Amino acid sequence: MAATAVATAPSVVPCKYKTGRVLGEGTYATVREAVHIESGKRYAVKVISKKLMQGKENMIRNEIAVLGQISVGHANILTLTDYFETLNN
């Protein structure tokens, strides 16, 4: 007997970051300065356009998975601290 998949609606969560000026731009993404609202810590946020990456979503999932596995504590690779999805990015 096959299990039935139950679709769940995406949850809406208030943004934890306030974004600022653009630090860099590429073909599919923009890197912006950001501040974590609760802690005041500063980060660089890579904002990837869903519209520009349509059909290439697997590339984004792969990048997140790879950074999540190898970035923590590596001196030459930025550490992936958090990731989230919005309606457009």
Image (tube, helix red, strand yellow):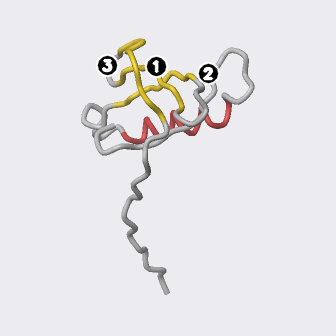
Cα gap from disc 3 to disc 1, whole angstroms: 18 Å
Indicate the secondary structure of the residue bearing disc 1. strand
Image quadrant where residue 81 sits: top right
Residue annotated with mark 3:
27
Front residue of 41/82: it is 41
Cα gap from disc 1 to disc 2, whole angstroms: 14 Å
Which residue is pictured at 30% across the width and 41% down the height? 55
| Rendered location of residue 88, percent (x, y) | 28, 40
Residue annotated with mark 2:
78
Left or right of 26 in this view: 69: right
Q: Amino acid at mark 3?
A: Thr
Q: Which badge, 2 or 3, comes first in the chain's sequence?
A: 3
Q: Amino acid at mark 1?
A: Glu
Please identify the residue farthest to the top as the structure is shown.
Answer: 24
Indicate the secondary structure of the residue bearing disc 3. loop
Q: Which mark is residue 33?
A: 1
Q: Are marks 1 and 2 in contact (CB under 8 Å)?
A: no
Which residue is pictured at 31% across the width and 19% down the height? 27
| Rendered location of residue 87, percent (x, y) | 30, 45
Image quadrant where residue 40 sits: top right
Front residue of 12/73: it is 12
Cα gap from disc 2 to disc 3, whole angstroms: 20 Å
Which callout, 3 or 1, points to the residue nearer the camera?
A: 1
